[in-house]
Image (cartoon, helix red, strand yellow):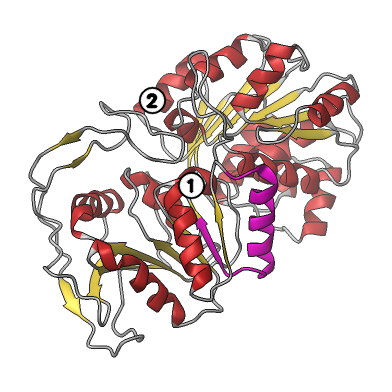
Amino acid sequence: MSFASLGLTPAVLRALVTLGHDTPTPIQTQAIPLVLAGHDLLAAAQTGTGKTGGFALPILSRLFPEGAPRHAGRAPRVLVLTPTRELAAQVHDSFKQYGAQVPLRSATIFGGVGMQPQVDALRRGMDVLIATPGRLIDHMGQRTVDLREIEVLVLDEADRMLDMGFLPALKRVVQALPQQRQTLMFSATFSDEIKQLAGQFQRSPKEVSVAPRNTIAETIQHIVHPVDASRKRNLLIDFMAQDSRRQTLVFARTKHGANKLAESLDAAGFRSAAIHGNKSQGARTKALADFKAGRITVLVATDIAARGLDIPQLPVVINFDLPMVAEDYVHRIGRTGRAGETGQAVSLVSHDESGLLHDIQRAIKQEITITNFAGYAPSGPLRIDAGAPRPIMGNRGGQRPSRDGQRPGGSKAGAHRPHHAKPASTGAKPGQRRNQGGSSRGNGGGGSRSGWTSRA
């Protein structure tokens, strides 16, 4: 299967040749012909599967059928909504790369930066607008954006937008769009919530799915190091000291925790930076650019800020804190082991996180090797089959996450089903690892307002 056989225009094909892309991914193979045919589409695709190309390539072919626009007005004709600033910027970059051979006018608008440059770009006119819901609502309120000419609406990572509480904002945006339009929804899962959203926003959508729910790359090695909570930070430093040159993405649960962790790593001699919703957009952009360029080797992130991070050949992801929702583990570790590369997913787990670990193993349907890191064996064995109470998982009957993945109070008790992972001692000397084998998708800052939350 080649891109040429999918019906893309010559100008788009030339851009793909320049980029060195010759074979479409499975999601692109299935999605591109349906988008070109004008169907509404509900697509399930995990991060790193080429889903942006699945909608950007056919959209560009439809906008510029002969290499030139069908018409060039000021109002945008395509609207792409994303949950975070970083993902908006990433999608914008993809459109520019794929549209290098056509006169594409595009822009991105998101929070955390001044509105006036965005207003100026909107006034100049564009074909494709990539936006986060919160900032788009701001522009709608000030009447600086005209959505009456939208022909195609794309909801990228729709599941995450629901998790972040954007449903009221999405409904408000959709009400401002023409009823006659094509609507494309890309999500990691076909959950009941996503199906319900599709019923509200789409008409007889086609469905494609390239991977079952919570599918993860087989090239990722999953390792758990049990540790007392008070010693986690020292264990992280000793673990990373084994190869301080290795690029590492570390996940913390809160913004404050990410800051403290980055400061500790800096004090220990690592070149690190934190990225989360309270950071300015300039700081977030600089931290990510420095990380990709190797100027820093450790990026400490929260779940929401990390959504949309595209870091090629990232060797290791470390969960300093386990996520409160098991599916977020899949999104976190999806940053490593991409495109056939090997990767490590290392989790530092204290006793109070045993219930979360149980949920993760159940979600990914894989056993996770548990090994003591030499010198950091916890005061008692890690039991993930114990019926320890834990916070309510997800939004199904639970509470919505706050802006950086923290869940408010509320817990439920219940006995966990037993699993097969067994603790084991490595026998390694301090600072070394042995036998660590395992089985082989930022908010925008700002507060909530008028019924919608988690502005981006």
Label 1: which residue? 46
Count numbered badges in the picture. Answer: 2
The range drawn in magenta is: 279-300
Q: Taking 296 as reference, is 143 above or below it?
A: above
> What is the spatial separation of the Cα atoms under label 1 and label 2, in whole angstroms?
17 Å
Left/right placement of residue 326 relative to residue 379 reads right
Crowdedness near tag 1: few (<14), some (14–19) or many (≥20) residues, C-alpha within 10 Å:
many
Viewer-nearest residue: 437 or 131: 131
Judge by depth and name the residue closer to the eye, 143 or 31.
143
Give coordinates of residue 178: x percent, y percent: 68, 10
Callout 2: SS: helix
Return the disc, 1 or 2, that comes first in the chain's sequence: 1
Residue at the (79%, 49%) spot, across then down: 97
Q: Give coordinates of residue 270: x percent, y percent.
A: 54, 73
Query: Quarter of the image containing the C terminus?
Result: top right
Residue 440 percent across, percent down from the top left? 35, 68
Q: Position of residue 18 (x, y in %)?
A: 83, 58
Residue located 82% across and 51% down the image: 15
Label 2 sits on what residue type?
Glu
Image position of 80 with respect to 358: above or below: above
Q: Is residue 342 magenta?
A: no
Q: Which residue is mark 2?
A: 193
Q: Using the rendered view, name the quadrant where residue 297 is placed.
A: bottom right
Amino acid beneath label 1: Gln
Residue 340 visible to an observer of this rendering: yes
